[in-house]
């Protein structure tokens, strides 16, 4: 008899969780509170209680090749950065292609998830749900995958802003912001410096009298577009860059990153210079903020000290009068109201989850959290790898290490975070994209071996090491191997270029500088491969040299 798994949520993580369960011979039952798939990517004119909410102009901050499912590439004609409606279309295509919709119970709220009395032996859960007609139902499951996301419950720290109760204007959380039209001609303060805060400030600056962007600590700012016009993430999320970051001292890497970011805009001059180093917190991504600041449409201010009538007083003593609206872009709280707090202390959830997925204290590993990490890259492929691993563990295809090892790993991660990352109000742990993906891939047995690829398929190995670390790399071998992975990797640049070629131009002739660049790249490649092989497989190089010795003679 197939093991039954409850999947909570039918967003991007819930859909791949269903598929992964099916691939492992499990029987998934997905409970979705709304009437449609998509989760965060479903736009609604009015925020819905218990559901994520986005603004109408939202566009992805990771490019399509970096944020697709590993065996389902985006079509070539799709733009590299996508409007939320395009992402929703993609999720619908994915669900239809793999026939996932029949496993989803729509308009069904999960009320509680509790251990069965015999949990220590069976690992089973009792899941209580309520349908749209208010009928309650209880069912037994062998596993639970929590795919409910962490952009549902707003963090609104009003206690930190004296006078907000008597503020004569309007205040709201960014989840309630939808369109700029209602703010026409107003004076608006946006509090926050993460992606949503800056997106909203920039958009409002086109219709308001004035926008003030208030930030407590500033942020490093990056663009969607790299120096040569390609998506930024395909250039910097590569295995070669990741290798250099791990080999070089952390302070050196920060210095190089900051030097590069300062070349686009002098952060101190524009008032956005943060107190932390570039790699100590995920940077803010926006293409237009510097131009809106230099035009005066956005004025950067320090943290708000208090609200006084219709005025806002800032920590530097300056006062802005006639403020009509204050928007709190202050993030979200991680909350799972259907779970007993004793299972996962939400305020410290990342400190008790092995690899940010499995609660280390559970007697049986049949509960997993999908999507709780905050990678320096796309969350979608991370969710997919987490789901592949979780499904295999619940199916019994592989096991977790002893509890002692789990806790040691959690403690190790905590120490590294304290050394490299700054303390933050955000409750989801930040992770390096490639390093964390590889950690998960090792658990499944799907991490690509670059040295062996160079021996067997040099063309593919070059693309894997020097090119973007796209999700297809984790389908080249091992459980879940996909026959189309190699082709997807070798054609990824063509799909990146395709939507940019609306007007065809003549190709530039090959120049000497291009040849010189190629020779330099080849030299760097050889050095990098040698370092990588020596680092990952210390015994491999001496063995190859011994084999090559007699041939040379």
Image: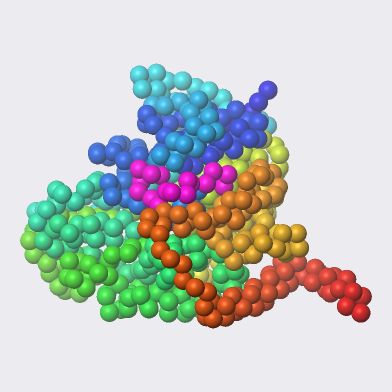
Give the magenta range: 70-87
Give residue 169's position: percent from left, percent from top.
11, 53
Decide if residue 239 is on the left or right side of residue 545. left
- Main SS, magenta region, reads loop
Total marks placed: 0
Decide if residue 95 is on the left or right side of residue 516. left
Which residue: 29% across, 58% down?
Answer: 199
* Closer to the camera in the image, 187 or 355: 187
Give residue 318's position: percent from left, percent from top.
15, 73
> Magenta span has 73?
yes
Decide if residue 256 is on the left or right side of residue 331. right
Give the colour scheme of this rendering: rainbow
> Magenta span has 31?
no
Q: Is residue 470 positioned above or below 112 on the image?
A: below
Which residue: 66% across, 40% down?
Answer: 392
Quadrant where the C terminus is found in the figure? bottom right
Which residue: 37% across, 58% down?
Answer: 503
Give residue 62's position: percent from left, percent from top.
43, 56
In this rendering, does residue 305 appear at all?
Answer: no
Which residue: 38% across, 78% down?
Answer: 263
Q: Is residue 437 positioned above or below 149 on the image?
A: below
Q: Is residue 12 positioned above or below 279 on the image?
A: above
Quadrant where the N terminus is found in the figure? top right
């Amino acid at each position: 008899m197939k093991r039954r798994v409850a999947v909570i949520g039918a967003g991007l993580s819930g859909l791949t969780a269903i598929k992964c369960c099916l691939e492992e011979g499990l029987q998934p039952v997905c409970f979705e509170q709304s009437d449609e798939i998509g989760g965060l990517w479903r736009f609604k004119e009015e925020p819905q209680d218990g559901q994520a909410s986005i603004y109408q102009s939202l566009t992805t901050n990771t490019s399509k090749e970096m944020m697709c499912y590993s065996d389902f590439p985006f079509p070539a004609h799709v733009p590299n950065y996508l409007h939320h409606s395009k992402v929703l279309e993609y999720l619908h295509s994915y669900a239809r292609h793999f026939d996932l919709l029949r496993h989803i119970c729509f308009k069904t709220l999960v009320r509680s998830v509790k251990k069965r009395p015999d949990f220590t032996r069976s690992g089973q859960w009792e899941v209580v749900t309520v349908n749209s007609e208010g009928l309650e139902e209880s069912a037994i499951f062998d596993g639970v995958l929590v795919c409910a996301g962490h952009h549902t419950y707003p963090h609104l720290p009003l206690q930190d802003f004296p006078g907000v109760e008597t503020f004569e204007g309007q205040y709201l959380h960014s989840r309630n912001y939808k369109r700029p039209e209602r703010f026409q001609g107003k004076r608006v303060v946006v509090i926050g410096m993460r992606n949503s805060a800056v997106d909203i400030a920039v958009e409002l600056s086109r219709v308001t009298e004035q926008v003030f962007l208030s930030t407590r600590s500033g942020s490093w700012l990056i663009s969607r577009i790299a120096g040569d016009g390609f998506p930024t993430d395909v250039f910097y999320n590569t295995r070669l860059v990741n290798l250099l970051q791990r080999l070089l001292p952390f302070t050196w890497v920060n210095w190089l990153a900051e030097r590069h970011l300062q070349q686009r805009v002098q952060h101190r001059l524009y008032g956005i210079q943060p107190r932390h180093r570039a790699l100590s917190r995920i940077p803010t991504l926006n293409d237009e903020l510097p131009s809106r600041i230099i035009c005066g449409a956005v004025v950067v201010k320090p943290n708000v000290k208090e609200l006084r009538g219709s005025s806002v007083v800032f920590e530097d003593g300056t006062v802005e009068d006639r403020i009509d609206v204050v928007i709190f872009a202050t993030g979200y709280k991680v909350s799972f109201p259907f779970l007993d707090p004793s299972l996962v202390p939400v305020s410290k959830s990342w400190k008790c989850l092995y690899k940010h997925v499995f609660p280390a204290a559970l007697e049986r590993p049949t509960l997993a959290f999908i999507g709780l990490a905050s990678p320096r890259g796309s969350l979608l492929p991370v969710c997919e790898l987490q789901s592949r691993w979780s499904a295999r563990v619940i199916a019994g295809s592989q096991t977790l290490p002893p509890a002692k090892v789990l806790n040691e790993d959690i403690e190790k991660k905590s120490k590294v975070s304290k050394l490299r990352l700054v303390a933050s109000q955000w409750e989801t742990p930040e992770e390096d994209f490639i390093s964390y993906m590889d950690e998960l891939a090792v658990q499944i047995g799907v991490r690509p071996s670059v040295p062996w690829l160079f021996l067997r398929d040099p063309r593919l190995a070059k693309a894997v090491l020097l090119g973007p670390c796209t999700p297809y790399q984790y389908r080249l071998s091992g459980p879940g191997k996909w026959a189309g992975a190699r082709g997807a990797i070798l054609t990824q640049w063509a799909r990146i270029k395709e939507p940019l070629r609306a007007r065809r131009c003549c190709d530039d002739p090959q120049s000497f500088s291009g040849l010189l660049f190629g020779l330099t790249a080849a030299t760097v490649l050889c050095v990098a491969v040698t370092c990588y092989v020596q680092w990952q497989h210390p015994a491999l190089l001496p063995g190859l040299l011994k084999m090559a010795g007699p041939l040379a003679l």
